[in-house]
Amino acid sequence: MTPLDPPKKLTRKDFVSDQEVRWCPGCGDYAIVAAIQRTLPTLGVRRENTVFISGIGCSSRFPYYMNTYGFHTIHGRAPALATGVKLANPELDVWVITGDGDGLSIGGNHFLHLLRRNVNLQIILFNNRIYGLTKGQYSPTSLIGKKTPSTPLGSIDSPVTPAAFALGSGARFVSRAIDIDAKNMTKVLTRAHEFQGTGLVEVFQNCPVFNDGAFTHFTERATATETQLHLEHGKPMIFGKARDHGLRLRPGSLEIEVVKIGENGITEGDLLVHDETNRAQAFLLAGLEPPHFPVALGVLYAAPAEPFEQSVLDQNRQAVTSRGQGDIDALLRRGHTWTVGED
Amino acid sequence: MDTFAASQSAERESLESVVIRFAGDSGDGMQLTGSQFTQSTALMGNDLATFPDFPAEIRAPAGTTFGVSGFQIHFASRDIMTPGDAPDVLVAMNPAALKVNLNDLKRGGMVVVNTGAFTAGNLKKAGYTVDPLEDGSLDPYRVLKLDISKLTLASVEEFELGTKEALRSKNMWTLGLMMWMFDRDRAETVAWLEKKFAKKPEIAKANIAALNAGHAYGETAEMPQGIGCYTVPKAELGHGTYRNITGNEATSWGLIAGAKLADLQLVLGSYPITPASTILHTLANLKEFGVVTFQAEDEIAAVCAAIGASYAGSLGITSTSGPGVALKGEAIGLAVATELPLVIVDVQRGGPSTGLPTKTEQSDLLQAVFGRNGDCPLAVLAAQTPGDCFYAAIEAVRLAVKYMTPVMLLTDGALANGAEPWKIPSLSDFEPFPPTFRTDPEGFHPFVRDPQTLARAWAKPGTPNLEHRIGGLEKHYDSGNISYDPDNHHKMTKTRAAKIAGIADDIAEQAIDQGDATGDLLVVGWGSTYGAISQAVSACRRDGLSVSHAHIRYLSPFPKNLGDLLRGFTKVLVPEMNNGQLVKVLRADFLVDAEGLNKIAGQPFKVAEIEAAIRSHLSPSDTQASE
């Protein structure tokens, strides 16, 4: 096959590597790898152009299980490495795999700068609110009071909300999914892939060994309709088993409140309509948490801008246009020179 | 150490060599003055070497000793290699500059002082209780006292600038005077001022007027006893076209040339750090060469982006100084483990920690060779003169690409900012070295090796049917898959070491730079000490001493013959601007009784310091003392 041939129709199996998966039984990571392997064939991508880049942690073993190019790098630095890959070859389709410890603790700095630069790639943040690979210490997304080997009396530092951090960093695509909800995960993965810029997907992922049930209060299928708000651009924010609850701005404030349609004269027309290009609204949605609110899922924010590496290449092209293609011999002789003898 | 004598004739006296140090406040423009004098001197055809020495503070409080900025130039009608041990001429723009630099001036040397800055306040700030212009402390020198401030104000009067603005031209007035004194041409400086102040023509004119006024002052004023005018004839340089070049320029251009010879796109990931930043600046301004520069969020991201670029099939490079190398250590280990090409430029400065950011040192050698977790070998080279940085950079690229390995290129602050006339090579003088990217899936795995070089295959993403995974975990020798097998780890560690050791087959044997291949004393240096050692050995050999000089470019691996060469001498002396690093490695690797000569002052060696050490090692009294 040459790069000019049309891609042959690929299936999930084409993206499965020959390496034995070594996550714990029941780990949410299995569902995520399966969702990505199922999604890739629908995106029309080529295996040889696809690169998975990870840091360190349970989730970062991910590239070994993909039959694509992959780079398992060092703790926290995958965003920086991926930026270099895109600068060298913007045509590559790059997926960064990270976790709450890798991406938000040791790699928090790179996470911030990747997002604000808007490098054209996808970054999947596996958030399980715990350190798995190092055996169960609390992470930057662990809730206050979390008892772990390093916090026997309970953790005392306030957790970070990844979506809010991302928005604050200048991210231009912020989305969320749940590990066991393959259908909706596929949707956001597809959207993130379409997005020209850094597409962040935070996946709430269960760690059955060190933090089992961290998200069951909103991921349980039985109560999901009450605890989850699936965002759709241009649609009112409605949830509930009977589709009779909604979100609106509390009159006279910049706060969201839950209202019941039909009560106190509330109609569907009073509800907030999701506008994924509205950054202020995305901030409000990122902060909603049970039990008072549903968790906002899907695409919270999507505001395209020119990807970083395109701007870099544009500057390089402009330099060639204005100065001509660089000539090294001319460069060495630029400025003052003098000749001794007959040169 | 004699300085030139006074000349009173109307004729210019011809001198073989002169060392001038310009010194003033960091806001006085001494670096510009020095570099303009240098440019003019280069065009006059003299050989030269410079040493800019400035404080870490951008604008230290005016008038203080710690805010003094200096620029030393050594120029001659013969071949020279160092910026000179001691100045013949000191230009002191204020009391602090005089206080800091006077001790270095040769006895009988000339001192030009701006008396306009010798106010009670400035004297106090410099720590003088008595005015040194009055108390006889300048008696051993030839002194030219001028109120340069006042003369400058008069020269730019017609431009009606404010006093503060007008006084900024006093460096140009001074430069004009020195150009008169040493017969330099002003045309280049005039052109430079017109270009620099193209948008402020009044400022350009004022500076040019000051420059011309300083020159005219020399021509017309009667100079005091002991002050004359001089000329330094052209040096006998080899045939060719020359330019003036600083080390960081040469490094930048060498990296571009290396990328071109490798037919690879250069991707530089860098983070600003003194004294390496100008490499980033230079390359960022050469985008028409297809160079991609990325100012990363930190040192770690800078090297990681470079590694990512190499993984994707470009040439990843990162430029930094010692503290940056410390931060990059883990990522460099990743490049060693994944066997990707990478060039790390370490422009060394005084350490540990933040140390002396603007001062030079050679104290990162052990960090370069050993400073990572695990058994983590890579190639290390050092450049020895500003112009040599060009060649060393090309060699670093060649080795990185051929051996699929990180290569550390060591330069230092003295090379980075120092300048010398440089015979310009042509790109066609170099043999291209493009890598072969793997495309054949037959028998492929990511760690399949070239049997000769042991380099692994470079299969870049985008290549069909070579999809593979690499990472920092140990991988199996025969498949590249993750492996925790004990014997495999032993084998992989040995293989990584053998690959780097094998580079010794691909590099020149260690040469004796000067002197016989055997003898009483071998002086072994590396890096920017080249000029000082060379001149010291040369002086001692003229006196009949049995001393030779070898200068090591390849510090890891060493040239194959180095051990035999060391053993050909009774004694080995290793001058280094550190507390003894190369000497430690030489002793460990070759079991030779090498001795160190260490200068850890943030300043280059003086020729005289090395000469004295050579003489003391070769004198009979020393032999007795050591027995």
Image (tube, coloured by chain):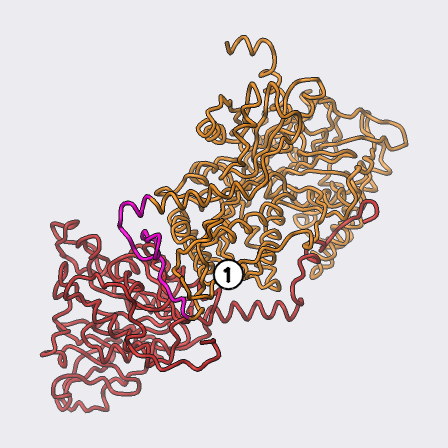
Chain colours: A red, B orange
Left or right: residue B498 compared with residue B612: left
Mark 1 crowdedness (10 Å alpha carbons): few <14, some 14-19, many ≥20: many
Q: How far across and down, in percent of the image, does residue B125 sit?
A: 56, 33
Asked whether residue B579 appears in the rendered view, the answer is no
Q: Chain of mark 1?
A: B
Image height of A320 relative to A181, above or below: above
SS at circle 1: loop
Residue shown at 41% from the left, 71% from the top: A48
Q: How far across and down, in percent of the image, does residue A11 sit?
A: 30, 79
Image height of A68 relative to B134, above or below: below
Magenta-drawn segment: B465-490
* Quarter where residue A328 is shown: bottom right
Q: Spot the residue most to the right.
A: B10
- Is residue A133 within the magenta segment? no
| Residue placed under numbered mark 1 in the picture | B314
Residue shown at 32% from the left, 82% from the top: A275
Q: How far across and down, in percent of the image, does residue A181 sit?
A: 19, 77
